[in-house]
Amino acid sequence: MRNVFVKSLIKESERDKDLILLTGDLGFQTFEEFAQKYPKQFYNLGNAEANMVGVAAGLALAGKKIFVYSIASFMTMRCYEQIRNDVCQPNLNVKFIGVGGGFSYGNQGFSHNTIEDLAIMRVLPNMVVLCPADKIEAKLAIQEAFKWSGPVYLRLGKAGQKKIYSRQPKFEIGQGLLVNKGKDITLVSIGNIIEDVLEIAERLKKQDLSVRVISMPCLKPFNSKIVLKAAKETKAIFTIEEHSLIGGLGSCLAETLLETDYSNILFKRFAIPDRYCPEIGSQSYLRQINGLSIEKIIKDILKKIRRRYNRI
Amino acid sequence: MTGDNKKIIGYQNLAKKIRRLILEIAFKTQTHHLGSSFSIVDLLTVLYFRTLKINPKKPKDIYRDRLVLSKGHSCLALYITLAKRGFFSEKELLKNYAKDGGKLGLHPDKGSLPGIEVSTGSLGHGLSVGVGLSLAAKINKLSYKTFVIIGDGECNEGSIWEAAIFASQQKLDNMVVILDYNHLQGFGRTEEVINLEPLVGKWQAFGWSVKQIDGHNFKEIIEAFEQIPFKKNKPNIIIANTIKGKGVSFLEDKLESHYKKINQGELRIALKELK
């Protein structure tokens, strides 16, 4: 997804000379072409994220359109107050690109893995939160970010191998995407865990369940319409995300549902438990030990359905 | 009397008026930060009535000089100076300051009233934003200058030094930092909390062109601003030696002048001293 971002940025920068990319000393083998093509639109601010975001705000106040780039955990947490005070309150045109969201950085350790970003970015007024699932969603999300004049957080992860969309869907900020139709249960997913979610849907189909799959590349503003439709038309909703149980997609959906007539729908959140993971490992290993393995999710879903509807 | 001397007397009178109004409003609203506001009044007076290229009728003019009050807690001094300079009326100031439904808090928010360029209040933010504004001027080939007022206690923040090294890396000679060196921070003397000395040497080592002045001496203030840029390709810093609470005996160089709310008797004494 990172490469999709760079390509889009190179293309846009040709057209828009007010676009400026700031990086916190990251981008080796990524930003060389951009820096070479547009040296006046590229600044390496060094390992100083707080200053980087303040500088971004100053540039944006003077009419520039800023993309700030770092690893998701550094991008969101080191400089959180700068994001809040300097960018979100005055509603400035600054886009925050956080790479390696969730467990994408695998065995780099807990400092590099980011499981809190969606929650803390979502709570900021004026902030749009995007978390694409694959390269197609990433491209669409970036295109929308170019058009948006206020702050955006864009969490990028590694794109999986699986093809999610047979043709490019239409997307705009505030919209969820229907990936698979289904009428028994709904799986709602955010980010690159969609690959596993589609596998789960496939396997549940074999259990004679018609599974709807929704991808939510935009967490905020949240598209309640698509999930309420699912709540109306299917009998259960499960959220799956590579993010803390607190404050992410599952929380967002729970908040939405509880205030509607569908508050008693069968519902469960699959997310990372509220703890610092004591082990390191690959992304798939970390998913597995954090209750996000395909097998575990299927088992829990079936158990829930059996308990409520006495079937399967 | 030379023209400049006449002007200086004018600035002195204006600064006195601003200090009196600070006292009156702070008493009426029972708000604090008097000491921090008083130490920058003389600097603000010269900036807004002489140095800054601004037009209160065109507060968003792209060619205007920018002033960022990074030590946002001194904003009562800024609000009053902006009102005196015509950005908004004193009536509007009184209607909005520290009131339910008002727009002017004890720390300034951008977009509240004209002339307030950046939201500050949490220390260590304004300098980076100022660096961004200065960098934009360089990129856009605009001649405006960016002035950032920071506090000495604010220099405890790491982000100040992040901004400082980046500004010199980018050779931002179009930016001017004014360090209000009154030697008192929220809960102690700067020397006792975190000693900033050698302060001149520190900024020089970070690649800045440094000038030290008496921050209450109008002649020195004027001269310093007129010499900008001190050196080509180097960001400028004026270390203004100031006195917290300057002008009122029971506030001068007192730690409590940071949080003190004055009563009627104190107001009377203070106003008398500022006649």
Image: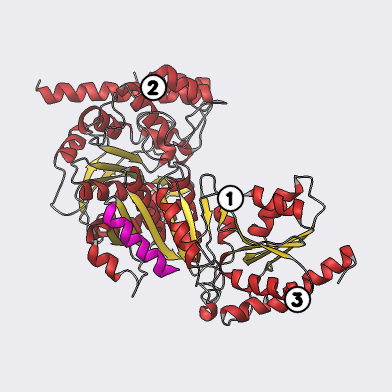
C-alpha distance separating marks 1 and 3: 39 Å
Of all chains, the one bearing label 1 is A
Asked if badges 1 and 3 are on one and the same chain, I answer yes
Residue type for callout 1: Val
**A20 and A312: which is toward the camera:** A312
Residue indicated by mark 2: B20
Write the residue at 45% across / 18% down. B268
Indicate which label's residue lies in the foreground, 2 or 1: 1
Rendered-image quadrant of the N terminus of chain B = top left
Image side of residue B251 versus residue A241, left or right: left
Give the quadrant of the C terminus of chain B.
Answer: top left
Q: Is residue A172 above or below residue A3?
A: above
> What secondary structure is the stretch in magenta mostly built from?
helix
| Three-letter amino acid code at the position of disc 2 | Arg
Q: Is residue A6 left or right of residue A104?
A: left
What span is colored magenta in the figure?
Answer: A1-15
Label 1 element class: loop
Q: Is residue A10 magenta?
A: yes
Chain ID at mark 3: A
Q: Residue at x 47, y 57 (%)?
A: A141
The answer to whether B59 is drawn above or below residue A185 in the figure is above
Residue to which mark 3 is pinned: A206
Q: Which mark is residue A123?
A: 1
